[in-house]
Image (tube, grey):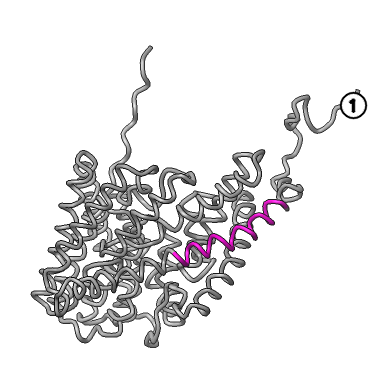
Amino acid sequence: MAVGPTGPGGEAAAGAPQDPFALVRSRGYLKLLLQAAVIGVPVCAVAFGFLAAAHALEPLVQHDLPRALGFAGTPLWWPVPLLGVAGLLVGLTIRHLPGGGGHEPADGQAGGGVPRLSALPGIALAALISLGFGAVLGPEAPLIALGGGLAAGGVRLLDRHATEQTVAAAGAAGSFAAISALLGSPLLGAFLLMEVASLAGPRLGMLLVPGLLASGVGALIFTGLGDWTGLGTYSLALHDVPVAAEPTVPEFGWALAIGLAAAFLGTGIRRLALALKARVVRHRVAATVVVGLVVGALAVGFTAVTGKPVTEVLYSGQSALGSLFGDSVGYSVPALLLLLVCKGLAYCASLSAFRGGPIFPALFLGAAGGVALSHLPGLSATAAFAMGMGAMGVAMLRLPMTSLLLATLLMGRSGLTVMPLVIVAVVVAYVAVLRLTPAPRAVAPATA
């Protein structure tokens, strides 16, 4: 009897060459691509609705609500009770709704795998309250969870015989589509999910292609809804970025310094957030209320000293990046340093108790630090802004390629000019953060 390439159970025979692209040639992969194209439509529609709701909550709770309560304007102390109420609502949501409101942002960018459909309402509610009321977190982590959960749940409902591999691939495509719509580029979304999931080799292409298809189809829906409603697309973008000069030798020295400074700052924020989280989880509702009061008090203190709006400390900083860069001359160095302290502490507190993502506050802190350093000789504002974003991004995310691309593509042509400086700052920050992080302790095997 002739011996074929596979054994009795269908597994590859010893010595037979493996075909890494066999999955792509199968009919199941074509079905997966079709599902990905269909998935992109509802996922990006939900992502648009989530971002629109989060943006609509900000003026509602900051301006409309105080007037409805009889105040002539927004009182200076308003963020303190507002964030306290947000802490109460988020704490109750985390405790009582399925899914615990999603993963803990202090633990990192992704966690817990693709959520079940039953967990999505709690994830969306906790994130909307956190983001809309002023917690210093971004929308990217909830979008990844919502996109992946909707896509995986949809495949389970439509095909009860779907394998776990198919469900996982659909979930990855849904997350890809949602995060690409926010970042404004499938390239950024691809690198983010690639580094988070540690994909490599042929498996990388096979899983990214359905995600690219879902993000491309979904982007049409995302843009169409923005034009139809007149609300815009909510994608990350900077406008009117000055033309950057070619990098100089002193600026490469500044890249080393910025990378090291971001590593120490990011490590301090992460450790403090984890220490606070360990206390928050023991008394979830009460501790989240206290954290909200602290975040509000930090914003009020900053405004009382500088006269700047409380929103400079509150919220993710995504929409404030452009104004920070464009109005950098209106900030004194002491005001920028106070902004770093207040927003950094509010960021730590928000990571420990609220729900959201860590990317945009990290970019804002890095940008503010870069603008402050640009007052020193030998460092241009554009280069400092980009290096600060890249270095602080990798210090918090530990995703070097994503941090580099965020810092450079966000600034357009000027970002490409200063990319060598950003590369140095990102690499230095990344290596320094890993050196500052203690190695995980080996766990002794359990005895019988």
**Left-right relation of 83 to 36:** left
Local crowd size for mark 1, using a 10 Å CA cut-off: few (<14), some (14–19), many (≥20):
few
Q: Amino acid at mark 1?
A: Ala
SS for callout 1:
loop
Residue 282 located within the stretch drawn in magenta: no
Q: Is residue 219 above or below residue 15?
A: below
Task: Report x, y in % for residue 283.
Answer: 19, 41
Direction from residue 239 to residue 168 in the image, left or right: right
Query: Residue lying farthest left?
Result: 305
Magenta highlight: main SS: helix
| Image location (x, y in percent) of residue 113 | 46, 44
Does 15 appear above or below 97? above
Task: Note whether 145 is above or below 253 in the view shown.
Answer: above
The C terminus lies in quadrant = top left
Q: Which residue is mark 1?
A: 2
Give percent across and percent down for residue 298: 14, 64
Is 42 part of what is drawn in magenta? yes
Q: Residue at x 29, y 70 (%)?
A: 58
Instruction: Please tell me how many numbered marks the rendered image carries.
Output: 1
Give percent across and percent down for residue 208.
59, 56
Q: Residue furthest right?
A: 1
Q: State left or right for residue 22 relative to residue 445.
A: right
Residue 314, above or below 151: below
The answer to which image quadrant residue 423 occupies is bottom left
Residues drawn in magenta: 31-49
Q: Quadrant of residue 1?
A: top right
